[in-house]
Amino acid sequence: MGAVLSTVATTSAEAKSAIAPEQNKAREDLNYNPVRTPNGWTLPYKEKNGVKEFHLVAEEIEHEFAPGSTAKCWGYNGTTPGPTIEAVEGDRVRILVTNALKEHTTVHWHGLILPSGMDGVGGLSQPQIAPGETFAYEFNLKQNGTHMYHPHADEMTQMAFGMMGMFIIHPKEPEPIDRDYCLLTHNWAMHPGTSRPDPSVMSDFDLWSFNSKVFPATESIVARTGERVRIRVGNLSMWHHPIHLHGTSFTITGSDGGRWPQSAWRSESTEIVGVGQTRDIEFVATPGDWAFHCHMSHHTMNVMGHNIPNPTGVNMRGLDGKIRDHLPEFMAMGENGMAEHQQHIDAGRHSGPANTLPMMSGNGPYGPIEMGGMFTLVKVRDDITPNDFSDPGWYHPPTATIAKRVSSNPNYGDPPRKPTAS
Ligand SMILES: [Cu+2]
């Protein structure tokens, strides 16, 4: 037992030091273009007699959604999502799973074609992996595409706490993709002032995440002008996510069924990634800073109350003072809409509960971005070198191409309005 745990500790430590899209070989020595997991990492493997051996450890971790909100979550090898597993069609893989939780677990390889006994449904396809035990899964990869892994034991709890990851299988023939990214969507019931996700929530979640991070902590997707970019999006949350990219029309090119024949591709600007599904989108990068987000507007917000009365249009003058007699920090807002929320937060006038993120945050070159949650940026520049994934800062568009103020007079111009019926 001690030996097992010390091996695990070493593997986990090695893994943490190798936060890079490359696995064991240098990027240029691979026969595929490795996927990059923003805010995440790829699990290194050991080659043993022709088998690629990976080692996952299910464990409790300390996770930061964004500065200001950390929680006890469950994940693999120190992170949620767990590290991305990456291999090639035709590979034989062995995946060791050590359970460092205090309850049993299993791992289900979501979307993979494999023997029934390797499918990871506790009680159905195998005995549960008890705390302290290590199980080995071993199978051939018979397909390619964007897949996922997650527990199939006390699934509601273990997934709500963050146990999930992506499993990318490349085809044998290289694909014409310059930059390959993967994002796993999730939702969290991190109630204000708490530090552990609540697994019993079914719809009113507090945090919505890409790779378990919320904006502005989501790492940008970076590309050079003209590169072909693929973003693989998986969904193991409790909601569907209409994923939207600004500034370009993308093509839906694949899923856990691999890269589809071109006759099945579709041009879209928003694609719903349903619960349990994966979707690959591809586009040619055009220069700019482009928003990439879920289009459910509450999914691009952080923690908020859902049961408060609607303040818009309500005259709240005088209300502050009366309520402050009972709640000294109370501040009425929202009379003219909610945009003032971020201004108050940024000015430090409204502290909110401990360990709880504001509803909207993030500042851009022109002011507050007023987003949160499942929101990130695609940053495309002309001068980015092929292996550079570092954030290039803000885009500076040519002056003539920025929307600009033409008047501050509220009665400016003569805008047509629909005539009223006489
Ligand atoms: Cu969403």
Image: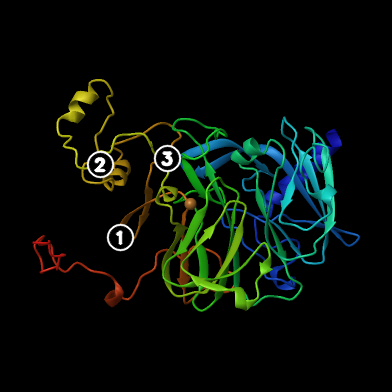
- The residues bearing labels 3 and 2 have C-alpha atoms spaced at a distance of 16 Å
Quadrant where the C terminus sits is: bottom left
Judged from this view, the residue extending furthest toward the front is 422
Element at label 1: loop
Q: Which mark is residue 256?
A: none
Label 3 vs label 1: CA separation? 24 Å
Residue type of the residue flagged with mark 2: Gly
Q: Which three-letter amino acid code belongs to the residue tagged 1?
A: Tyr
- Of circles 3 and 1, the one toward us is 3
Mark positioned earlier in the residue sequence (3 or 1): 3
Q: Label 1: how many residues lie within 10 Å, few (<14), some (14-19) or many (20+)? A: few
Helix, strand or loop status at disc 2: loop
Q: Position of residue 190 (x, y in %)?
A: 50, 36
| Residue 229 locus on image (x, y percent) | 56, 71
Q: Nearer the viewer, residue 422 or 245?
A: 422
Which residue is label 3 attached to?
Answer: 303
Corner quadrant of residue 86? bottom right
Amino acid on which disc 3 is placed: Val
Colour scheme of the picture: rainbow
Where residue 78 sits, quadrant-wise, is: top right
Query: Spatial distance from mark 1 to mark 2, Cα to Cα?
Result: 22 Å
List the residue tagged with mark 2.
334
Ligand 1 contact, mark 2 (Cβ < 8 Å): no
**Location of residue 155 in the rendering, given as x and y in whole percent from the top left corner:** 67, 39
Q: Nearer the viewer, residue 151 or 407?
A: 151
Residue under label 1 = 366
- Residue drawn at x 39%, y 68% as measured from the top left: 395
